[in-house]
Image (tube, helix red, strand yellow):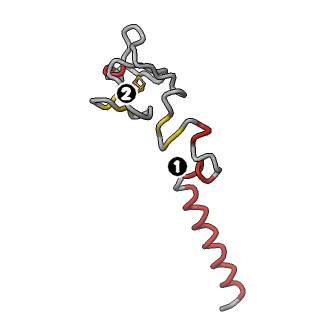
C-alpha cells in the first residue's frame, strides 16, 4: 500500500466517524457526561419540573386538550405519568 493510499484510508475513516457522530445527536448529552439530566432531558422528553407540569388545569388549558397528550396518561414532550386534567408550559391547543 502506498503512502497516499494510507492517507486516503485515514481520511475516509475520519469522515465516516464524523458522519456517525452527526447522525446521533441524541447521544450528545450522554457523550458530554450529563446523561441529559443536567438539561432535564431524557430522550426527547423534558422533566416535569423543567416543563413546570402540574396535575391541575390552567384555566381552560389542560393536557387532554393538548396536541402533545397521549391517552390515557402520557405526553410526547414531558416525562412520566401525565394527568388528562394536568397542564404545563409546553401546552399546545389540539388541532
Ligand atoms: S400540557 Fe401538553 S405538553 Fe404539557 S404535559 Fe400536558 S400534554 Fe404534555
Which image quadrant shows ligand 1?
top left
Residue 56, placed above or below residue 29: above
Residue 91, placed above or below residue 73: above
Mark 1 is surrounded, within 10 Å at the Cα level, by few (under 14), some (14 to 19) or many (20 or more) other residues, namely: some
Most distant residue in the left direction: 72
Label 2 CB less than 8 angstroms from ligand 1: yes
- Please indicate whether residue 3 sits to the left or right of residue 38 in the image: right
Residue 12 rendering spot, x and y as whole percentages: 61, 73
Residue 63 rendering spot, x and y as whole percentages: 36, 21
Name the secondary structure under disc 1: helix
Query: Which one is earlier in the sequence, the residue at label 2 or at label 1?
Result: 1
Q: Which residue is mark 1?
A: 26
- Please indicate whether residue 79 sits to the left or right of residue 74 in the image: right
Residue at (44% x, 32% y) in the render: 78
Closer to the camera, 42 or 28?
42
Q: Which residue is mark 2?
A: 82
**Residue 59 in which image quadrant:** top left
Between the C-alphas of marks 2 and 1, the distance is: 23 Å
Label 1 CB less than 8 angstroms from ligand 1: no
Amino acid at each position: 500500500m502506498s503512502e497516499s493510499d494510507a492517507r486516503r484510508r485515514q481520511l475516509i475513516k475520519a469522515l465516516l466517524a464524523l458522519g456517525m457522530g452527526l447522525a446521533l445527536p441524541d447521544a450528545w448529552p450522554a457523550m458530554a457526561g450529563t446523561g441529559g439530566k443536567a438539561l432535564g432531558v431524557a430522550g426527547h422528553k423534558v422533566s416535569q419540573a423543567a416543563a413546570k407540569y402540574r396535575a391541575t388545569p390552567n384555566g381552560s388549558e389542560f393536557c387532554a386538550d393538548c396536541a402533545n397528550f397521549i391517552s390515557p396518561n402520557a405526553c410526547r414532550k414531558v416525562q412520566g405519568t401525565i394527568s388528562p386534567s394536568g397542564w404545563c408550559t409546553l401546552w399546545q391547543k389540539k388541532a
